[in-house]
Image: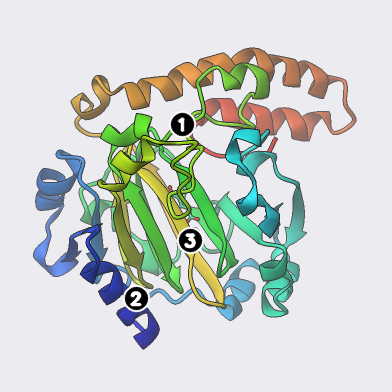
Amino acid sequence: MNEYYTELTKDVQSRTVNFIERVDISSLTPETFVEQYQKTGNPVVITGLLKECNWNLDYLCEKLGTQEFLLRLYGHERYKQDKRQWTNIGSGVEAQNMPFTKYAQMLRNHQAHENDIYLAKCSIQNTTLANTDCLKNIGEQLGLNKPVSDLNIWVGPGGHIECLHYDAVDGTLMQLYGAKKVVLFPPSQTYNLYPFPVYIHLRYGFKLRSWFSQVYPERPDFNAFPKLKQALQYKWELILNQGEILYIPAGWWHEVTALGDDMVCSVNRFWSVFPISRIMFSWSIWRTYLGTLCAFPYILLSLAIALFSRERKQKITKILQFVCQPHVDLPT
Ligand SMILES: O=C(O)CCC(=O)C(=O)O
C-alpha cells in the first residue's frame, strides 16, 4: 500500500465516523466468515487474500486486447445535477462499445478522466481473465458458495463516483489496482437516504432505479433532505486498498469513489443471501422486487420496439439478460 493511501486510511479511521473492521485471511476460516459476517450481515474488509493481483493497465491490455466493452460516458456535470431531476442512472447515460486497448489509451492520455468515462460491471466470463489464478476460489475461502452473477470488472479514472445505492444480494468488491473510498450506510437508514420511489420504474423502466439515493452524502443539502442528518450519524467510511476485498451485505448502501490520478480497477461478484431470514422481512429488499415488477410494462414495450428495430437480436438479448439477472446493471 503506498504512503498516500496509508495516510488517507488513517485519516478516515481517526475521524468520528464509524469504520469497518479489517480482518486478515490468516485469522479467518470459511466457517468463521459465515458466522461472524455473512449470518449477521456485517460488512468487513478482508486483507491478504488477493496478494498475487496487480491488474495494471499493461496487464489488462495484454489480457483483454481489442475485446470490446461497453463504456459509460458520464461527464463531470453529472455530479453537479440535482438527482431529483435525473431521468437515468448509470445505465441510461450515453454508452458506447469500444476495444479495451482504445479505452486504455483514453486512460493514459486522461481523456477518460476529463470526460469521466467508466467501464462498469462488465462480465469477464468470456475473457482470458475468467480463469486467472489470483481470483481462484475466493468465494470458497470465505464460505460463499452460491454466486448469482459472473465476475464483473470495473475500470475507470481516478475521480469517478458510483453514486449511492444498495443491492438486493450480497456482494464482494475486490480491489485489484489502485484504491477506492467507500461510504456505507446500514439498511436501517434507507428512508433517511431518500431512495427514488418505487413507482419511477413504471415511467423509466430500469433507466432510473428505486435502489439509488437522491442525496449526495458528501455534499448534503439538509434543506431538501432534512432526514439525511440522521443518516449521517450512521455513515461508515473506508479506503479499500489494492489487494483488499470488501464484503457488502444485501441492503447496505454504498457510494464508491475511485481515488488518485491513475486508473483504478476492481472486480465484483454477487452472492445469494444466507440465511435468507436476514432479508426476508426487509422492506429495502422487497421494494427492489416491487420496483422490478413495476418495470415490466416498460420492458415489454421495449421488447416490442426492439422487435421492429434493425439491431433486433442485440437489443432483445440485452433486455432478456437483464430480466434474468435484475440486479445486474445493463445499458438500455
Ligand atoms: O466499484 C464501483 O465503482 C462500484 C461497485 C459496486 O457498486 C458494487 O460492488 O456493488
The answer to whether 282 appears left or right of 220 in the picture is left
Residue at numbered disc 1: 195
Judged from the image, the secondary structure of the residue bearing numbered disc 3 is strand
The tag earlier along the polypeptide, 3 or 2, is 2
Q: Residue furthest right?
A: 310
231 or 133: nearer the viewer: 231
Task: Name the residue tied to disc 3.
Answer: 257
Label 2 is placed on what type of residue? Leu
Residue 31 on image: x %, y %: 10, 49
Residue 57 lies, in percent from the top left, at: 59, 76
Q: Is residue 137 visible?
A: no
Q: Are marks 3 and 2 in contact (CB under 8 Å)?
A: no
Mark pair 1, 2: CA separation:
29 Å
Question: According to the image, label 2 marks what residue?
Answer: 8
Q: Quadrant of residue 320?
A: top right
170 displayed left or right of 323: left
Residue at the image position 48 percent from the left and 53 percent from the top: 219
Which label's residue is closer to the chain start, 1 or 3? 1
Kind of residue sitting beneath label 1? Pro
The residue sitting at 19% across, 31% down in the picture is: 275
Q: Residues within 10 Å of mark 1 (few under 14, many from 20)?
A: some
CA gap, disc 1 and disc 3? 19 Å
Residue extending farthest bottom: 3
Q: Indicate the quadrant where residue 243 lies.
A: bottom left
Judge the density around disc 3: few (<14), some (14-19), many (≥20) Cα neighbours within 10 Å.
many
Type of residue at label 3?
Thr
